[in-house]
Amino acid sequence: MKYIFVTGGVVSSLGKGLAAASIGTLLEHRGLKVQLQKFDPYLNVDPGTMSPYQHGEVYVLDDGAETDLDLGHYERFTHSNLSQLNSLSSGQIFETVIQNERDGKYLGATVQFIPHVTDEIKSRLHLSTERNPDTDVIITEIGGTVGDIEGHLFLEALRQFALDVGNENVCFIHVTLLPMLKAAGEIKTKPTQQSVAKLREIGIQPDIIICRTEHDLDDDNRSKIAMFCNVKKQNVVAFRDVKDTIYECPIDLRRDKVDRLVCDVLGLESDTPDLSKWQSFVDRLVKPSQKTTIAVVGKYIELNDAYKSIYESLTIAGAEHDTAINLIKIDAEEIETLGAEAVIGKVSGILIPGGFGERGTEGKILAAQYARENKIPYFGICLGMQIATIEFARNVCSLTGANSTEFDKETPHPVISLQEEQQGITTKGASMRLGSCESLLYPSSRSHELYDRADSIHERHRHRYEFNPAYREQLEAAGLIIASISKKEGLVEIIELADHPFFIAAQFHPEFKSKPNSPHPIFSGFIKASLEHS
C-alpha cells in the first residue's frame, strides 16, 4: 500500500480537498485504484450537529456517516465509495481513547497524547489499509493548517506512521499560498517558506509543494521555493485559480505533471493518463450551447457551501444537456415579505433543498405553490418534498393549517410528522434516519421512467420527519402521486403531480449520487424539463 498525505499551510480554504480529489482523479486515469479520506482536528465527533454557516453542507455516505463536504469532492472526482472509515475527527479519537481507558485496555498506564492518541490515529490508517486490500494508494487530507494546536497530534501521528511503513511508501504533499502583493508587483514566497519550516519542525519533510496562486509560477520562484524548502525544483507545483469550473483542477495540476511526480516519489509504475473524457466534460461546462435559469429557494443562500452538492449536481446535469445553469439564489424569507412572483419572477425551474427549523418555511411553501400553479418545473429535496406536501394539502385539499409537526406541534393536519422510530430520541448526533435505503418505484410514475424503469433504487437519507401515511389516501384522491415507498418501512419517498410539466419531490438526497458524466437521473430530468420550459 502507498500513502499520500495532503497538508495545508498559511491560510485555510486553499483547496486542499480539491487538490487531493484532483490527484485522485489523475491517479485513477493512470490505472491506479485510489481511496480518499479526511482527518479533521476539530473536537466534534462529526459535522452532523454543526451549523451550515460554520461548516457548509453535511455530506452523507451510504453507511449513514455524516461527513465533511470534501468527501463529496472525493466521491465526485473519483470512483471511491466511501464509508465512516474515511472520516476521522479528534472528537472520535478522544472518545475512543477515553472509552478504552474506562474499559481498562491500557492496563493501568498513564494515558497520554503520545503514544495513546497518536496510536489511535495510526490504527485508523492501518484499518483503512486492511479494509481496502485492492487499493493502490490511500490519499488522506489533514484538515486545518500547519501550526494549528489541534492539528499537531495528527501530524505527529503521520510522522510516526511514515517510519512504521517505510518512507518509500509515503508521499507528503503540502499545499500553500503564494500571495501577489500588488503594491510590490511580485509574488511572495516567504509564507510558503515559513509554512514548510513549521512542518519540518514537527519532523515532516514535504516531497511535493503545491502552490495555490492567482498567477503562473515562474522559474525563479520555483527555484527559490525548492532551495529554501529542501525539495526538488520540479516538485514545486502551481495550482492556479481555475477560470470557469472546479473540474478544471485535475487538468491544471496535470500541466505540472503532479501525478507523475507522485508516482516517482512512491515508486509506482503506471500509464500516462488519458483525460479526453474528462476534458470533454469540462468543455461542455465551459462552452455550452444553451442556458436555463434555476431558482434555488433556501435559508442558507448567502453561504455557497451550504448547498454545495446541489449546485454541483445541477452543473453536472447541465453538462449532460450541453446547458449552462444560470443559478438564482433566493432567500425564502424574502418571499414571505414580497411574495413569490415578485422575488422569483420568470425562471425555468425551482428547486427547494433540505434544511431544518421553522425559519423561511412559509416562503418555501409560497415558492412551491408558485411552481405548481404556474407549471414551472419543480424539484423538492428532503424538506423540499415536505414543503410540497404541505402546500398541496393546504391549497388543493383545503386542509387549513396543514403543516409539519417540526414547525407546529399543534397543527390540525400534521401531513408531515415525526417518524415513529424517532419518538423519544433526545440526542442530536447521528440519530436521524441516515444513509442508503432501498425504495420501490411504482411503474406508472415519471420517476420510474427517469430511473430507466428500475424496480427499486438505493438513495441516501438524512431526516427525522416523514410524510404522514394517515393522509395518503386523501392526498392521492386529490391528485398527488406517490411514486416510491421505502421497501422496509413503506415510507413515502417520492411524490409527483401528473398534470404538470415536471413536479417531483424526494425525501432522500439525490445530490449525493451525481458524478461528472453521470448525473443523477432526477437532476437530469429536472434540467431537461427546465430547458423545455425555457
Image (spheres, helix red, strand yellow):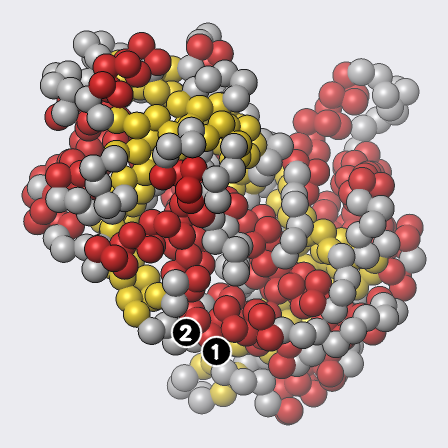
Secondary structure under tag 2 reads helix
Residue 213's place in the image compared with 221, above or below, is above
Which residue is drawn at the image coordinates 59% and 58% (left, top)? 77
Q: Quadrant of residue 269?
A: bottom right
For discs 2 and 1, the disc positioned in front in the rendered view: 2
Q: Report whether 111 appears left or right of 342.
A: right
Looking at the image, which is closer to me, 508 or 483? 483
Q: Report whether 182 appears left or right of 251.
A: left
Residue 276's place in the image compared with 334, above or below, is below
Q: Quadrant of the C terminus?
A: bottom left
Q: Position of residue 15 (x, y in %)?
A: 54, 62
Mark 1: amino acid: Glu
Which residue is drawn at the image coordinates 65% and 43% (left, top)? 82
Residue 425's place in the image compared with 211, above or below, is above
Which residue is drawn at the image coordinates 60% and 75% (left, top)? 276
- Density class for disc 2 (Cα within 10 Å; few <14, some 14-19, many ≥20) is some
Secondary structure under tag 1 reads loop
Looking at the image, which is closer to me, 239 or 347? 347
Q: Earlier in the sequence, mark 2 or mark 1?
A: 1
Mark 2: amino acid: Val
Number of dots carrying numbers: 2
Q: Position of residue 338 (x, y in %)?
A: 7, 43
Which residue in the protein does label 1 denote?
Answer: 214
Q: Position of residue 91 (x, y in %)?
A: 63, 33
Q: Quadrant of residue 86?
A: top right
Which residue in the protein does label 2 denote?
Answer: 286
Question: What numbered label is drawn on residue 51?
Answer: none
Q: Quadrant of residue 116?
A: top right
Residue 508's place in the image compared with 134, above or below, is above
Q: Quadrant of the N terminus?
A: bottom right
Q: CA distance from mark 2 to mark 1?
A: 19 Å
- Residue 400: in sight, yes or no? yes
